Image (cartoon, helix red, strand yellow):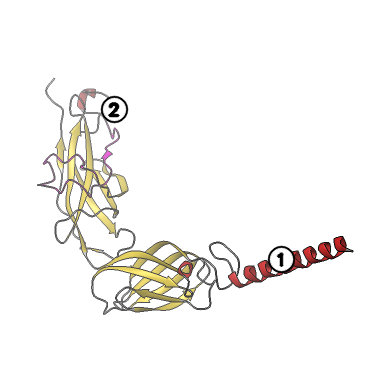
């Protein structure tokens, strides 16, 4: 009789513990980024800022868990509340008002009170990008190759990292032979004064060769040499770095270099 009562007591305790665990799980609303219920974790992967004709800035916020809570709000750390135009589990479109001062902010997405229902990412508003210079430089034992790279700075002369530059390269005989697209990086580049005067030393694109556009007269110094002549470039676009709405001033500076062989 004693054994039967002990077994019954143990079974009741186990059933009670299981019921408590199931209730707690239901209250948490599941686990993971983008789960359903009040406990869904929020995460921000990227913020893309797009300037609007109205002067407002559209924020495309990608991530997860945006519909997993009891509410949804997007704010800046100065108290500015963004209007949410569209929202899915993985994307929010929200508008930053045009009267928001330029500067650095933390953008926060909130779907509830617990910390895992809030996520923040840094953004920067304002600023102008300018093409500090388009640099051309030679290489090879007979200076038979010519290369180009671009330096980007802000209105204060500071290097801009992460801008995406699109530009053409052309020869006065062959015309445009290349359209280049490259982000600016935190590297020194190859500036040698041919196209740049006191560059910042960073905010530089990759560098591109004329890729053997043609031989010099008499095949000297060889078939793989770039074509003799005058080289120049035109900037087509400078796109803002991630999480900023910087604007390019639209100026493509004059540049160029004449390529001819060294005396043999």
Tell me residue 73's x, y (percent).
Answer: 43, 77
Q: Position of residue 106 (x, y in %)?
A: 33, 68
Task: Tell me which label, 1 or 2, sits earlier in the chain.
Answer: 1
Q: Which residue is mark 2?
A: 224
Percent of width and height locating residue 22: 68, 68
Where, quadrant-wise, is the C terminus in this rendering?
A: top left
Disc 1 residue crowd, few under 14, some 14–19, many 20+, Cα 10 Å: few
Q: In the displayed structure, does residue 40 sit left or right of residue 77?
A: right
| Mark 1 or 2: the one toward you | 1
Q: Which residue is nearer to you in this view: 262 or 241? A: 241
- Left or right for 204, reference 156: right
Magenta range: 187-214
Tell me the SS state at disc 2. Answer: loop
Q: Is residue 238 placed above or below 225 in the rendered structure?
A: below
Q: Residue at x 14, y 60 (%)?
A: 156
Q: Is residue 229 visible?
A: no
Q: Which residue is mark 1?
A: 18
Total label count?
A: 2
Quadrant position of residue 261: top left
Q: Residue at x 27, y 77 (%)?
A: 100
In the displayed structure, would residue 12 be above or below residue 212?
Answer: below
Quadrant in the picture for residue 230: top left
Give the prevailing secondary structure in the magenta stretch. loop
Q: Nearer the viewer, residue 51 or 226?
A: 51
The answer to whether residue 24 is magenta is no
- The verdict on residue 207 being magenta is yes
Q: Secondary structure at mark 1?
A: helix
In the image, which disc is placed on residue 97?
none
Q: Quadrant of the N terminus?
A: bottom right
Whether residue 170 appears in this view of the structure is: yes
Mark 1–mark 2 Cα distance, whole angstroms, equals 77 Å
């Amino acid at each position: 009789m004693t054994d039967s009562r002990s077994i019954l007591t143990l079974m009741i305790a186990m059933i009670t513990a299981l019921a408590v665990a199931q209730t707690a799980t239901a209250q948490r609303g599941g686990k993971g980024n983008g789960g359903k219920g009040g406990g869904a974790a929020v995460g921000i992967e990227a913020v893309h800022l797009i300037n609007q004709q109205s002067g407002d800035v559209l924020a495309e916020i990608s991530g997860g868990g945006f519909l997993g809570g009891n509410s949804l709000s997007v704010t800046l750390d100065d108290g500015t509340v963004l209007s949410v135009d569209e929202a899915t589990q993985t994307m929010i479109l929200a508008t930053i008002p045009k009267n928001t001062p330029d500067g650095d902010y933390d953008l926060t997405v909130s779907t509830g009170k617990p910390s895992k229902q809030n996520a923040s990412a840094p953004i920067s508003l304002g600023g102008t990008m300018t093409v500090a210079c388009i640099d051309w430089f030679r290489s090879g034992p007979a200076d038979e190759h010519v290369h180009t790279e671009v330096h980007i700075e802000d209105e204060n002369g500071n290097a801009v990292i992460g801008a995406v530059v699109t530009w053409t390269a052309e020869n006065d005989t062959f015309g445009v032979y290349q359209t280049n697209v490259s982000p600016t990086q935190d590297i020194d580049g190859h500036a040698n004064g041919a196209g740049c005067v006191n560059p910042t030393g960073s905010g530089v694109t990759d560098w591109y060769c004329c890729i053997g556009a043609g031989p010099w007269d008499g095949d000297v110094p060889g078939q793989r040499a770039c074509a003799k002549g005058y080289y120049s470039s035109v900037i087509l676009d400078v796109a803002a770095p991630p999480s900023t709405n910087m604007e390019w001033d639209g100026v493509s500076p004059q540049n160029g270099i004449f390529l001819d062989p060294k005396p043999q």
